[in-house]
Image (cartoon, rainbow, N blue to C red):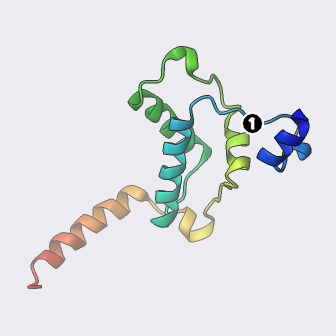
């Protein structure tokens, strides 16, 4: 009977070795919201960015050390659960100097502000 309940509540349970356990759903939900906002803006993110954002969210939400996950073993199951893939920019898009872009945006913004709206 227990197996039937598990199948109904988690349809892909039979295809996985063990169910994915989420210790802090609030942190995971906030991380998913951040990823969604990044995708809506057309921004890309990396595994390193996910790690850092998760660290900051744990601090912000006051997660005690006893409930914090150690290491990076959470990334692969998290990405698999939410169908998250890391995309790398190649060619011209991958070689852009971000600081130069920021500087140029400011310069163009100041230039455009001299024109009447």
Q: Residue furthest front?
A: 1
Viewer-proximal residue, 41 or 99?
41
Instruction: Tell me the quarter of the picture where residue 13 sits.
Output: top right
Above or below 78: residue 68: above
Task: Name the residue carrying label 1.
Answer: 20
Which residue lies at the image location 57% right of the left edge and 20% below the top edge? Answer: 67
Q: Is residue 109 left or right of residue 48?
A: left
Which residue lies at the image location 37% right of the left edge and 64% below the top edge? Answer: 101
Location of the C terminus (image quadrant): bottom left
Viewer-proximal residue, 11 or 105?
11
Q: Is residue 104 left or right of residue 26?
A: left
Residue 10 seen by the camera? no
Location of the N terminus (image quadrant): top right
Residue 115 seen by the camera? yes
Residue 68: give x, y in percent of width and height.
57, 22
Identify the element where label 1 is drawn: loop
Residue 72: give x, y in percent of width and height.
66, 31
Which residue lies at the image location 45% right of the left edge and 65% below the top edge? Answer: 41
Task: Using a 10 Å C-alpha cutoff, classify the residue at mark 1 as few (fewer than 14 neighbours), some (14 to 19) or many (20 or more).
Answer: few
Instruction: Tell me the quarter of the picture where residue 87 sits.
Output: bottom right
Q: Residue furthest top?
A: 66
Residue 105: give x, y in percent of width and height.
29, 67
């Amino acid at each position: 009977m227990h197996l039937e309940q598990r199948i109904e509540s988690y349809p892909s349970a039979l295809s996985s070795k063990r169910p994915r356990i989420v210790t802090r759903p609030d942190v995971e939900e906030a991380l998913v919201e951040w990823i969604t906002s990044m995708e809506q803006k057309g921004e890309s993110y990396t595994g390193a960015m996910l790690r850092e954002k998760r660290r900051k969210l744990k601090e912000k939400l006051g997660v005690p050390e006893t409930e914090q996950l150690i290491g990076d073993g959470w990334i692969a199951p998290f990405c698999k659960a939410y169908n998250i893939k890391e995309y790398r920019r190649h060619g011209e898009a991958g070689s852009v100097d971000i600081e130069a872009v920021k500087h140029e945006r400011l310069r163009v913004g100041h230039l455009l502000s001299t024109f009447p709206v």
